[in-house]
Image (cartoon, rainbow, N blue to C red):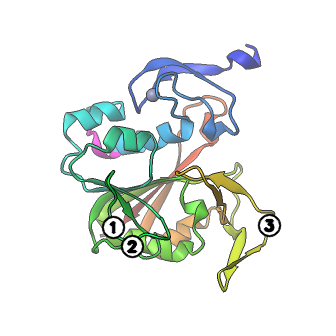
């Protein structure tokens, strides 16, 4: 098989399309896009866990789960302006999403229904959500300890934060900051690295995560699974998705 045709045939567990998922992206987790909705591997592996958690074995893709009505009584908070989960879930009655605009009041809601929220000082009451979703967001937060604690605060007991972050393979032992904020100034501890944020602007990567994320989350009252789908499809098995469940 040549490099151009590497990939696998399968089902998109976001949109339900069947087809060929080709290799060849910036990284394994950004590869294997759905031939229909274009969602890459990391999104679909995150979707797989939402299905495991809420589908009761009756859906194999998220669009079907949403259509089934089973999420209509689930309080969901997604930290996203756009993306495949927004596309599938934004019509759900108990779904809210947020983005951080420094110039808007925290908790305000714009005409598209997007709340302005700072992850280190969320405006939601304690124990508001069954499910929190973030997809490649937590590597852009400076004060991750406060942000994870805030997410834990707004989760109901037993609720889950299902999230993706860049994860190297092999996964290092320790999480390391890439940049420190001192008096509002960024001091770089590693060469600056940027991702594109939801509104298209560059956004600095603040942390490289390691296996001690399990301990960081334990300190917030969450038990964490780091899920690597053991599908055997080379090299998809190296992508990890994170599931932090609030104890209680
Ligand atoms: Zn798809």
Q: Which residue is mark 3?
A: 190
Task: State which mark lies toward you, 2 or 3.
Answer: 2
Please state the horizontal and vertical placement of residue 46, each as a whole percent of the image: 46, 44
- Span highlighted in magenta in the image: 53-57
Q: Secondary structure at mark 3?
A: loop
Q: How many marks?
A: 3
- What residue is shown at x 61% (from left), y 28% (from top)? 233
Residue 20 inside the magenta-drawn segment = no
Question: Which quadrant is the C terminus positioned in?
Answer: bottom left
Q: Quadrant of ligand 1?
A: top left
First along the sequence among labels 1 and 3: 1
* Ligand 1 within 8 angstroms of badge 1 C-beta: no
First along the sequence among labels 2 and 3: 2
* Ligand 1 within 8 angstroms of badge 2 C-beta: no
Do labels 1 and 2 touch, CB within 8 Å?
yes
Q: Which residue is mark 2?
A: 105
Q: Secondary structure at mark 1?
A: loop
Instruction: Determine the CA span between mark 1 and mark 3.
Output: 35 Å
Figure check: 14 above or below 182: above
Please state the horizontal and vertical placement of residue 69, each as a whole percent of the image: 19, 39
- What residue is shown at x 33% (from left), y 51% (from top)? 112
Task: State which mark lies toward you, 1 or 3.
Answer: 1
The residue lying toward the viewer, choosing from 46 and 186, is 186
Q: Quadrant of residue 128?
A: bottom left
Can residue 9 be seen in this snapshot?
A: yes
Please state the horizontal and vertical placement of residue 36, each as a whole percent of the image: 47, 23
The residue lying toward the viewer, choosing from 96 and 220, is 96
Residue that sits furthest to the top in the current view: 1
């Amino acid at each position: 098989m040549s490099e151009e045709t590497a990939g696998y045939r399968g089902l998109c567990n976001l949109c339900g399309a069947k087809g060929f998922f080709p290799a060849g992206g910036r990284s394994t987790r950004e590869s294997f896009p759905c031939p229909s909705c274009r969602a890459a591997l990391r999104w679909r592996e995150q979707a797989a866990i939402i299905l495991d958690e809420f589908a009761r074995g009756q859906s194999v893709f998220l669009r079907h789960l949403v259509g089934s009505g089973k999420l209509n009584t689930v309080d969901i908070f997604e930290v996203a302006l756009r993306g495949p989960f927004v596309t599938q879930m934004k019509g759900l009655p108990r779904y809210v999403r947020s983005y951080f605009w420094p110039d808007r009041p925290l908790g305000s809601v714009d005409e598209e229904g997007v709340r302005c929220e700072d992850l280190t000082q969320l405006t939601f009451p304690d124990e508001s959500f069954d499910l929190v979703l973030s997809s490649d967001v937590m590597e852009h937060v400076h004060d991750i300890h406060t942000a994870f604690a805030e997410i834990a605060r707004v989760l109901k007991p037993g609720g889950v934060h299902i999230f993706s972050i860049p994860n190297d393979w092999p996964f290092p032992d320790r999480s390391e900051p890439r940049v420190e904020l001192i008096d509002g100034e960024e001091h770089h501890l590693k060469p600056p690295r940027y991702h594109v944020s939801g509104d298209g602007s560059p956004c600095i990567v603040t942390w490289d995560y390691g296996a001690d994320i399990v301990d960081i989350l334990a300190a917030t009252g969450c038990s964490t699974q780091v899920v690597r789908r053991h599908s055997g499809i080379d090299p998809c098995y190296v992508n990890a998705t994170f599931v932090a469940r609030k104890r209680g």
